[in-house]
Image (spheres, rainbow, N blue to C red):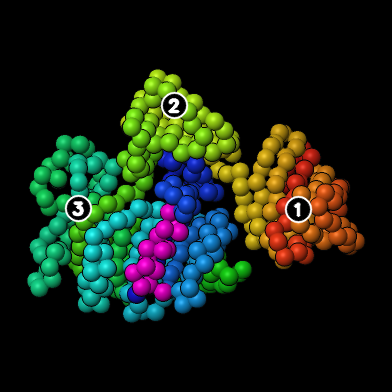
Amino acid sequence: MKAIILAGGVGSRLWPLSRELYPKQLLRLTGDMSLLQLTVLRAVSLGVTQVMVVASHAHRFYVKEQLAELSLDSSVVITILLEPIGRNTAPAIALAAMSCEPNDVLWVMPADHVLEINNLADRLATAQQLAIEGHLVTFGIAPKHAETGYGYIQQGAQFEGVANTFKVAGFKEKPDLATAAEYLASGEYLWNSGMFCFTSNIYLQELEKFCPEIYEACKQTVASSFIDLGFIKFPEQHFMACQDESIDYAVMEKTASAAVIPLYGNWSDIGSWNSLYELEQKDDQGNVVVGDVLTHGTHNCLIHTHSRLVATVGVSNLAIIETPDALLIADRNQDQAIKQVVAKLKQDRREERVAPRKVYRPWGHYEVLAKDDNFEIRLVTVKPGGKIGEHCHEDSIKQWTVVSGNVDITICDETNSYSDDGSVEIYAKSSHCLVNNGSSLLFMVELVKSNRINVLC
């Protein structure tokens, strides 16, 4: 079995932590590991040794860095496929399926869910057998309450000779509260987990039958794939022809071969701050607190702080999320409306919607410490042997100051070595590059003065 992990989403309802260029699946919301890392480890813990991560091209270096942090056994092979643009789950899964062998059994799952399921290995083994027999299996979560934030799967007749496994009678959109209560009372409905199991050829066969345009566009896209920096990349030209379609709409609601396996335990898609609050352990006042926080007369709040002290007095039922460049204060029960805030940020072209302060590159990363219209100060971290390639800026002056480490810096074909406290100024239109020639991390402070701040290569 191969694990296909879908890691291309944005998670705008978790703004300001989740950004377009640093989305929910990369966040460490429930501990020391990101949701993506936890998802990979879940698959590996169940014996899966071939993992395929389908991610956005814009997130490639973050994904690569986080996967490297796991230090997995050499028997585990992880492949990263990069979507040139987002086109929802049906095309993303098609890219993965076409990159596998026809009879490979695929366990497809989102990268940003929390999952603690009883007997998951047994349920997965049942799904694998059904997949080999030609079924497209989806997993439903046994609901614990009437929930309006999830889609539902209606169970049909039970498979003969296969315990607790059913045909799919229908898929339902996110209901209102009264309808969700009816679903819960009937005992026939499950929350739609977004997880699937099928063979590559059966999925592609059904996709070609019901959405031939997506199938053909993905087929042409995969035929033009290439490898770059260890990633499998796809040209944008053919993939742009794909419809933006989920696997539910494109295949699962139309196929006659759908099966559903109920799962029992704890599951959350962490689709909002309130869902994170419900997931986490509370203090005596019902608060979930992360970071440097002081509370007085504060009840049932979620408070995340990342760069400064946050103090609260006499407030209740709030989500307070602080980052170096943005602060969110919201009623926990209205956190679904955060998408409207993000939409306004997009309309106003605010960069707080898009980028985090820390940006990863193949050579390491940099973090923005301070900025204004005409300057930016960054802490640059370069891995041992890491190289920032030759480039130049038309209208900026740059200063590099070594805080710790050893580096060779080349400016206009002249190379010099610098170590602690060494500093060099680079003028506009001067070509320059560097290499960390030491065995430890290189830390530099970079000051860029310009009418147009440039991003490091």
Whole-Å distance between the Cαs marked 3 and 1? 53 Å
Residue that lies at the very extreme toward the top in this rendered image: 314
Q: Is residue 384 visible?
A: yes
- Residue 47 lies, in percent from the top left, at 36, 73
Q: Is residue 204 visible?
A: no
In the rendered image, which residue does mark 1 sit on?
A: 404
Give the label, 2 or 3, closer to the camera.
2
* Nearer to the camera, 86 or 75: 75
Quadrant hosting residue 126: bottom left
Whole-Å distance between the Cαs marked 2 and 3? 36 Å
Q: Secondary structure at mark 1?
A: strand
Q: Secondary structure at mark 3?
A: loop
Q: Which residue is pictured at 33% across the width and 80% down the height?
A: 103
Q: Which residue is pictured at 35% across the width and 43% down the height?
A: 280
- Residue 139 lies, in percent from the top left, at 25, 60
Please report the bounds of the magenta region as a residue range.
Answer: 35-49
Please tell me whether residue 322 is drawn above or below residue 4 in the rendered image. above
Whole-Å distance between the Cαs marked 2 and 1? 38 Å
Mark closest to the chain's N terminus, 2 or 1: 2
In the rendered image, which residue does mark 3 sit on?
A: 142
